[in-house]
Amino acid sequence: MATITSRGRALGPCVTVLFGTDQGKYPDGNSVLVRGSAGSLLIDPSQSVHAASPALQVDQVVLTHAHEDHVAGLSAVQTGAISVHVRDLAALQSVAGLMALYGLPADRIPAMTELVTERFHYFGWPSATGFDDGASWDLGGVVVRAISSPGHTGGHCLFAIDQADGPTVVVTGDIDLSSFGPYYGDAGSSLEEFEATLRMLPKIVADHYVTFHHKGVVDGHDAFVAAVSVFGEAINRREGALLGLLAQRRTLEQLVEIGIVYRPGTRPAVFGDSVEQRSIRQHLDRLLLNDAIVTDGSEYWRL
């Protein structure tokens, strides 16, 4: 097997993007390796990292969040420390914690457990530690700093990388700027927090932005801000679709069956229904709060 660095892109002297298959299309992703004079750090080890030969050796691994695809390569990395934001720590330490973060119905948990353990090599890392907002790692000539960006999960973070003799880089995790748009369909997700994060993003100025999926590297602040705007518009598109469905009375179950998140034929079998339900429920709660719709406790409809 080829070494993963053969598919990399250097962003200055200390930072290398390790591209996954198809620019990190799920279930793969784009990892980031940071090497300074005093240490090394890997962000979000992907499926491609797991397949790499020889295995990567780093002083520590940090995660933007604890979803299965962001730790798929973790078991193959030789490292002395693993950490994630404290709000996601339980999901990293055990499969049970991960299932709680997803919030799946009980009858879907066995299939999801099989998926994350067999396909993503996810077995839990009890010794992993949690970091707080603003945590930083000085690797010698390069500093990595966590920026809290919740919504996708409660603990989702960006990582700003400041090189003494190179460009600034921001790792955006699952703020992946894809046409799919923001994902807020887990029990650990929040539409409200995601929207606050989207409002914060244009204030983060860097030379390069690295997404875990799809885009890979976005060069320049102007291009990043434009991509964030398109990415966030998916929220309005979904809410508009939901309001269209509510031109007639419908139950939550009927709304989930039709869906506003996944295109027809693309809903994942194991967790897709749960994502639709959680996402739709958050939009319904907001529309009810704004008096845009009403409910009798069973059905919802537009005023």
Image (cartoon, grey):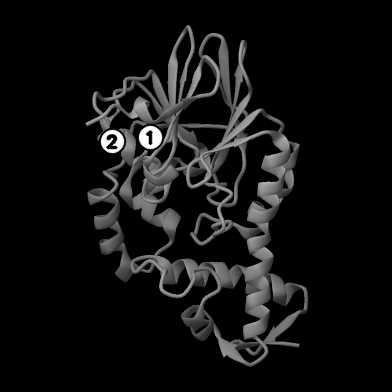
- The residue at the point 58 percent across, 89 percent down is 250
Give the spatial CA distance, label 2 vs label 1: 7 Å
Query: Looking at the rendered structure, which numbered label has been put on residue 25?
Result: none
Near mark 2 (Cα within 10 A), the count class, few <14, some 14-19 or many ≥20, is many
- The residue at the point 38 percent across, 18 percent down is 59
What secondary structure is found at the residue carrying circle 2? helix
Residue for badge 1: 45
Q: Furthest residue to the top?
A: 37
Image x and y of residue 218, in percent: 60, 38
- The residue at the point 50 percent across, 81 percent down is 258
Taking the image as shown, residue 262 lies to the left or right of residue 78, namely right
What secondary structure is found at the residue carrying circle 1? loop
Image x and y of residue 104, in percent: 40, 64
Kindly identify the amino acid type of the residue bearing the numbered disc 2. His
Corner quadrant of residue 29: top left
Above or below: residue 166 compared with residue 259: above
